[in-house]
Amino acid sequence: MIDVKPIQLSQFQEFDPNRMVAKMLHDSERCRVVLFCLEPGQEVSPHESSSEVIFYGVAGKGTVLIGETHVELEPQAFVVCPPTVPHGIKAMERTTILAVITPRPE
């Protein structure tokens, strides 16, 4: 039997005025889930991945870069970045974003 327990995102939210905080919530052979906590103006620099990345807005407001497009992401909304397309995050206010990365990057 599989031991399945819900993960409360609020328990993992942590903010640092000097840097963005990233918490790995799940890491398996098939998928990775990371919680990003950013203060206003903090960012995850644009980068590429061989995986598809789903960004889900948990709290606050931020901008997600997908290729050349800037998408405002608010709570209860998500945006998908296809593989090999540059992507990044910038917080407009205190922001929490959940990223689901699949397949897990090598």
Image: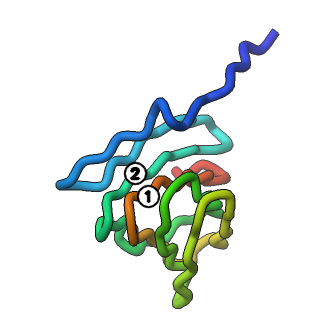
Label 1 amino acid? Thr
Q: Secondary structure at mark 2?
A: strand
Q: Write the residue at 52% across / 54% down.
A: 59
Q: Calculate the distance from the C-alpha at mark 1 to the C-alpha at mark 2.
A: 6 Å
Task: Report whether 95 appears left or right of 84.
Answer: left
**Between 84 and 12, the one nearer to me in the picture:** 12
**Between 27 and 9, the one nearer to me in the picture:** 9
Q: Residues within 10 Å of mark 1 (few under 14, many from 20)?
A: many
Report x, y in % for residue 20: 30, 55
Q: Which residue is mark 1?
A: 95
Which image quarter: residue 51?
A: bottom right
Residue contact between numbered discs 1 and 2, judged by CB atoms under 8 Å:
yes
Label 2 amino acid? Cys
Which image quarter: residue 26?
A: top right
Q: Write the residue at 67% across / 26% down.
A: 6
**Between 50 and 4, the one nearer to me in the picture:** 4
Report x, y in % for residue 25: 52, 35
Give above or below for 56 relative to 23.
Answer: below
Q: Residue furthest top?
A: 1
Q: Write the residue at 68% across / 63% down.
A: 77
Q: Secondary structure at mark 1?
A: strand
Q: Which residue is mark 2?
A: 37
Q: Quadrant of the N terminus?
A: top right
Looking at marks 1 and 2 on the same chain, the residue that comes earlier in the sequence is marked by 2
